[in-house]
Amino acid sequence: MTKSLKSAYYRIYQTGFKLAMPLLPWRKPTLLEGVGSVRRIPEVLKDLHISNVLIVTDAMLMKLGLLDGLLQALDKSGCKYAVFDKTVPDPTIENVEEALQLYHKHQCKAIIAFGGGSPMDCAKIVGARVARPHKSVAKMKGVLKVIFKIPTLIAVPTTAGTGSEVTLAAVISNSETLEKYPINDFCLIPHYAVHDPELTLKLPPHITAPTGMDAMTHAVEAFIGNSNTSETKKAALEAMVLIHQNLLTAYNEPGNIEARAAMLKASYLAGVAFTRAYVGYVHAIAHTIGGFYKVPHGLANAIIMPHVLEYYGSAIHRQLAEIADTIGISSPNESPSQKAAAFVRYLRDLNSKMDIPKNIDKISESDLPEMIKRALEEANPLYPVPKILFEEDLRKIYLKIKG
């Protein structure tokens, strides 16, 4: 099939999805907000008549004592719980299966995802395995492969970046094949989301930076794609304004609770945007680099995004110009291309101020054929990108990222 025919097929596929969007079973989680809101979870469980829950988190959060308030509230309410704290960055299928065993062993009826994107992803896929006990994680790869209702899922983000508390996506890694891929299904959208800014106060700067840029990537890729709605455009722009106004403050002043709360809201809004409008090649490339080299997802996105935006060229000048105008970094007399260039410079400058490198030099050219193949399989035909790219395009981008 020629490139022109492939491009036509991809656009038809994406248009079909866009037209079907209003008919699909979207939902937003019930939102608990404010300082101390994590202690309200037992009330939610009591109202749902749930007395046994599985908490999915990681060892570092346990060590930092971030779960203490939640555990104390659960103890006081009499709700029983089991804790799976072995989630690794870029959670693996093994993580999911081990947590699933704990869920069944303790006869749990709900799942609390507590942490950043990794515990969220792990918890979502545990829920999927509960719903589909005879279907392997590998067979859930892609879109609408779960379908059945998962147990009540309460998402408690401790980072402001993934927006996973409002999205239908979960990303999993296969430690044997080094493959990293998303599972997308409406049933994976959490039922409740808890935005307690106190939980993010202990987040160190080297985590605040890439997670914040992860949210920026979600908002940018959603905004420049071809499946936007008025709601997703508004949410993406509002997220970018909040990130522009608060990310550096949260990075430089970790205890600034107003900036932390604003970043949680930004992450959520970016999640609202991209779960409807999708992402693009930045994410597809980041997933391969994360799978091959264990580069954290937010860090990979932050580094990759300026390279991909530059490569799109004039296809996104108008969209980037609107972003630059909205966040206030452009001049009225500049052309759209100048404003677009200013926004890409702004992203690079933001990365530099937070010690995020310009390149990922660990990329090996011998790995490129397989990485390119996987990135294209993820992105095409699903992602409604502003410009369809092919193998030679991605090769050039990977080499730019490598530096």
Image: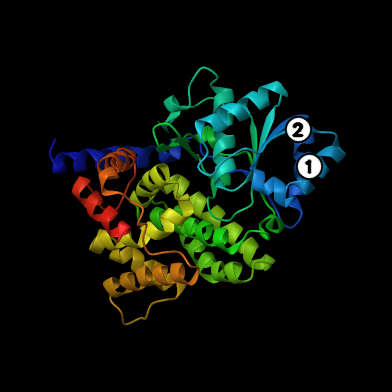
Camera-side residue of 401 and 325 = 401
Q: Tag 1, which secondary structure? A: helix
Task: Tell me which amino acid carries mark 2.
Answer: Tyr
Say which mark, if any, is on residue 81: 2
Q: Is residue 319 left or right of residue 8?
A: right
CB under 8 Å between callouts 1 and 2? yes
Q: Is residue 34 above or below residue 5?
A: below
Can you give x and y, in whole percent of width and height, for residue 162 in the image?
Answer: 53, 50
Q: In which quadrant of the rendered image does the C terminus lie?
A: bottom left
Instruction: Give the label on residue 71, or none.
Output: 1
Residue 123 sits in which quadrant? top right
Q: Would you say residue 231 is visible in this rendering?
A: no
Residue 258 against residue 221 in the figure, above or below: below
Nearest the viewer among 180 and 379 is 180
State the CA–CA distance, disc 1 to disc 2. Answer: 8 Å
Q: Residues within 10 Å of mark 1 (few under 14, many from 20)?
A: many
| Label 2 SS | strand
Q: Amino acid at mark 1?
A: Leu
Q: Which of pointers 1 and 2 lies earlier in the amino acid sequence?
A: 1
Q: Dot 2 surroundings within 10 Å: few (below 14), some, or many (20 or more)?
A: many
Residue 56 horizontal/vertical position (percent):
65, 37
In the displayed orientation, state which residue is furthest to the left.
2
Identify the residue at horizontal 66%, vertical 43% (top origin).
59
